[in-house]
Amino acid sequence: MTLAIVTVMIAGGHADTISVIAANGDTVVYITKTGDCYHKDGCSSLSHSKIQTTLKDAVDNGYRPCKRCKPPIFDN
Ligand SMILES: [Zn+2]
């Protein structure tokens, strides 16, 4: 049990899955004119408007991660 957890942590340090969960503030995300969520590139919610910003700015302005595209979450 303990060994399994440690193995996951070591492997996770190099895996993309970790950066999806927690990313630095410079990560590019997208917001829309009307929504209150931020998105990853390619999300279907961005079909009407798509404004490039950074993860830190999005979070600072009160935007929440989109439930549909699961963008990175700011790890401060
Ligand atoms: Zn989205």
Image: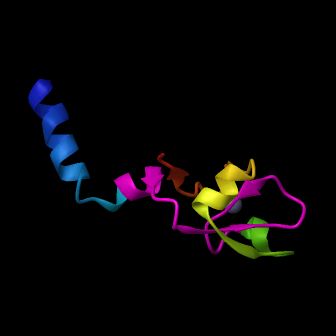
On the rendered image, what quadrant is the N terminus found in?
Answer: top left
The picture places residue 28, in percent across and down from the top left corner, at 57, 71
What segment is highlighted magenta in the picture?
18-43
Q: Is residue 55 left or right of residue 58?
A: left
Residue 41 in the image: above or below residue 60: below
Quadrant of the rendered image holding ligand 1: bottom right
Q: Residue furthest left?
A: 3
Q: Is residue 17 visible?
A: yes
Q: Quadrant of residue 47?
A: bottom right
Residue 5 in the image: above or below residue 38: above
Q: Is residue 74 left or right of residue 66?
A: left
Q: Is residue 73 left or right of residue 35?
A: left
Q: Is residue 69 visible?
A: no
Q: Nearer the viewer, residue 67 or 55?
A: 55
The picture places residue 32, in percent across and down from the top left corner, at 81, 67
- Which residue is at a point 68% across and 51% down the rendered structure image? 60
Q: How many marks?
A: 0
The picture places residue 26, in percent across and down from the top left corner, at 51, 67
Q: Nearer the viewer, residue 21 or 28?
A: 28
- Which residue is at a point 88% across and 67% down the rendered structure image? 33
Q: Residue furthest top?
A: 1
Q: Nearer the viewer, residue 57 or 48?
A: 57
